[in-house]
Image (cartoon, helix red, strand yellow):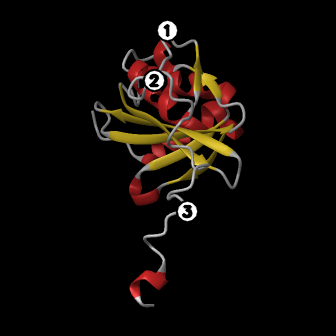
Amino acid sequence: MAKATNTELIELLGEKFGEQLFDVTEPYGFLTFSTHKDKVIEVLSFLKDNGKINFNFLTDITAVHYPEKGQIAVVYHLHSMVSGIRARLKVFLHENDPRIASATVLWNGANWMERETYDFFGVKFEGHPDLRRILNMDDLGVHPMLKQYPLEDPNRVDKKDEYFGR
């Protein structure tokens, strides 16, 4: 099978989903687009099961926190080994209620990726078979990758200029 192109994939997705997909870009040739959280499983299922593109490999699920927008983006990286194309799907959630459907119904490998995303960002994947922390302690009361915590202790005195003659 010939290698698929981003243009072909955009046309195929546009025919099926139209306005439900937005923010379509190609940074460094990597097709990136967004959808709404209620459409994510439908879009992922189409990408996986469509015979023309066949995104048979879920490379990664992660998240990005945008505190200035009050949002968390859940990011899915997909790879079609048959068509030789990759894509990135983003779904933006409100940071106060980060809930989204689990992709474990499509890929068993999504299990640990979703647990890691929950552990570090607090995203709750509804329908996940075993959503619990995977790397951090169970009693850790925070999600460490959220950008609501200062990078350094503001009370540190070892970095003050007066101690270095400045």
Percent from the top left, x then y, of residue 47?
48, 28
Q: Is residue 165 above or below residue 45?
A: below
Residue 125 appears in which quarter of the rendering? top right
Work out how far the residue at label 3 is from the one at label 2, CA to CA, in angstroms.
Answer: 34 Å
Going by the numbered disc 3, the residue's amino acid type is Asn
> Residue at the location (40% across, 84% down)?
164
Disc marking residue 129: 1
> Few, some or many C-alpha atoms within 10 Å of disc 3 (few <14, some 14-19, many ≥20)?
few
Dot placed on the residue nearer the N-terminal end, 1 or 3? 1
Instruction: Kindly indicate the quadrant of the structure image that contains residue 42.
Output: top right
Residue sitting at x 56%, y 36%: 13
Residue sitting at x 55%, y 62%:
155
Q: Pinpoint residue 84: horizontal percent, then vertical percent.
A: 30, 39
Q: On residue 115, which mark appears?
A: 2
Badge 1 element: loop
For the N terminus, give its image quadrant.
top left
| SS at mark 2 in the image | helix
| Amino acid of disc 1 | Pro
* Image vertical order of residue 105 relative to residue 38, above or below: above
Mark 3 or mark 2, which is nearer to you? 3
Residue 99 horizontal side relative to residue 5, left or right: right
For marks 3 and 2 on the same chain, the one whose residue lies earlier in the sequence: 2
Q: Are marks 2 and 1 in contact (CB under 8 Å)?
A: no
Most extreme residue toward the top, as rendered? 129
Would you say 103 lies left or right of 135 here? right
Q: Which residue is mark 3?
A: 155
Residue 111's place in the image compared with 123, above or below, is: above
Location of residue 16 in the rendering, given as x and y in whole percent from the top left corner: 61, 30
Q: Amino acid at mark 2?
A: Arg
Cα distance in 3D space between marks 2 and 1:
10 Å
